[in-house]
Amino acid sequence: MISCPVASVLYSKGKEEGRRKKEEGRRKREEERRGRKAIEPEKNLNSL
């Protein structure tokens, strides 16, 4: 694959950074979903 040690280190660091960004995006989406779910029951109580 990559024979140069410097290139392989840079490549692996880039992969780690991409993975971290993906996880952060996933967490943000989950928090937004939880926020919406917390708001929805209030609407249901008002309709009763």
Image: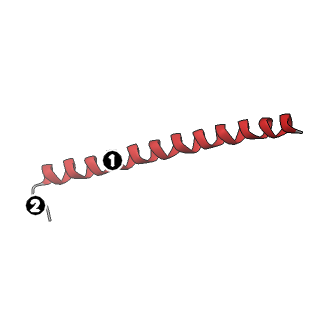
Distance of mark 2 from mark 1, alpha carbons?
Answer: 22 Å
Q: Of residues 30 and 3, which is closer to you in this image?
A: 30
Give percent across and percent down for residue 28: 52, 40
> Which amino acid type corresponds to the residue marked 2 in the rendered image?
Ser
Residue at position x 26%, y 52% in the image: 12
Instruction: Using residue 4 as the reference point, say whether residue 21 is left or right of it.
Output: right
Give percent across and percent down for residue 39: 72, 36
Q: Which mark is residue 40?
A: none
Residue at position x 33%, y 44% in the image: 17
**Residue reaching furthest to the right:** 48
Residue at position x 78%, y 40% in the image: 41
- What's the coloring here? secondary structure
For disc 2, the marked residue is 3
For disc 1, the marked residue is 18
Q: Give the secondary structure at mark 2.
A: loop
| Label 2 CA crowd tier, 10 Å (few <14, some 14–19, many 20+) | few
> Which amino acid type corresponds to the residue marked 1 in the rendered image?
Gly
Q: Quadrant of residue 20?
A: top left
Total count of labels: 2
Q: Quadrant location of the N terminus?
A: bottom left
Q: Earlier in the sequence, mark 2 or mark 1?
A: 2
Q: Give the secondary structure at mark 1.
A: helix
**Residue reaching furthest to the front:** 47
